Image (spheres, rainbow, N blue to C red):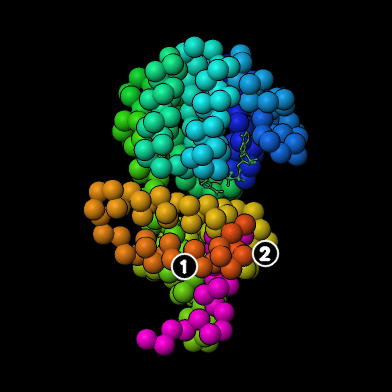
Amino acid sequence: MAKIAFIGLGHMGGGMAPNLAKAGHEVRAFDLVPDAVKHAQEGGCTPAASVADAVKDADVVITMLPAAQHVRAVFTNDIAPNAKPGTLLIDCSTIDVASAREVGEAMQAKGFDFLDAPVSGGIAAAASGALTFMVGGSDAQFERARPFIEPMAKAVIHAGQLGAGQAAKICNNMILGATMVATCEGFALAEKLGLDLQTFFDISSKASGQSWSMTSYCPVPGVGPETPADHGYEGGFAAALMLKDLKLAADAARSVGAYTPMGAEAEALYERFVEGGGGSKDFSGIIRMIDEPGQGRQN
Ligand code: NAD
């Protein structure tokens, strides 16, 4: 069994790290938030005092951080100077492709193996070990990393070379942002047309309007499986992080001249939701903005 350092124990990492401990690995866990470290300890991880302390004897380092600036800082300032040469580094955060490549190349130049391995699935999948991982790196690095990813995953897919995992994740989340908004609109309209929302769910979840946003993450409280909607849109995937991903998609689209009008509209709507104070709410909470009186446009 391996010594694994796990850095970033938030909504996602807090569920993922204990699954590695349950698989028999020695997991040294660190987060800037002491309660997050305590929670990981309750899940079978060993608390570390700092990133340096977590990574110093590790065979594998896994990070699950908010955004590119955190990934750059943690890898450059904390992991590279303190990890053993040859350590396998796996970043599961969602960041832009260029940053993933730059950080990865810098780590490889220092003698580490580095893969970008962002995930899809949400906090329930993180806690139950059922995430989908999309991994960028060489064939040999992918085969080295796979056994350490599997205890957290329902699927581990090699997307291509360094950065390809992030490219796949950005495209996936652009679809997710647009389908969540569309699902919210559908339910808000269904209610105004006098439909019972559970009945509409029963119909649409078995019809062509079905999507993950509807069947696994329904934005309406009391309808479908238990989701952040049932907890006042607390926890889950913060709207600010969805906005971050939509901006990453827009940047990526600009960089290759791709036309992404639905992604752009979803970005504008999430921008408005975040500016209105919804940034820390789950991203399905945008239904409240869409459902507000006076939202109808006078075109
Ligand atoms: P989060 O904000 O809940 O967790 C991030 C954690 O990183 C926090 O606990 C924070 O304290 C910690 N952190 C920040 N800087 C640190 C440092 N220097 N050292 C140690 N810890 C540090 O975010 P999350 O929802 O867990 O998401 C993490 C990543 O996964 C993001 O990139 C997000 O886009 C992506 N993601 C999230 C979801 C979701 O449903 N929440 C799903 C898929 C992917």
Q: Which residue is mark 2?
A: 232
Query: Mark 2 or mark 1, which has the lower sequence index?
Result: 2
- Give the structural element (helix, strand or loop) at label 2: loop
| Residue 201 percent across, percent down from the top left | 50, 71
Residue extent of the magenta highlight: 281-299
State the residue at coordinates (43%, 66%): 268
Mark 1 falls on what kind of element? helix
Q: Quadrant of residue 227?
A: bottom right
**Where does the image place residue 163, in percent across and percent down from the top left?**
36, 35
Picture mark count: 2
Q: Residue at x 64, y 37 (%)?
A: 9
Q: Quadrant of residue 231?
A: bottom right
Q: Residue at x 50, y 81 (%)?
A: 295
> Dot 2, how many residues are within 10 Å of its Cα: few (below 14), some (14-19), or many (20+)?
few
Q: Which residue is mark 1?
A: 269
Q: Residue furthest top?
A: 85
Please say if the residues under marks 2 and 1 sit with CB atoms less than 8 Å apart.
Answer: no
Which quarter shows the C terminus?
Answer: bottom left
Does the segment drawn in magenta span residue 119?
no
Residue 260 on image: x %, y %: 30, 60
Amino acid type at image mark 2: Gly
Q: Residue at x 49, y 55 (%)?
A: 242
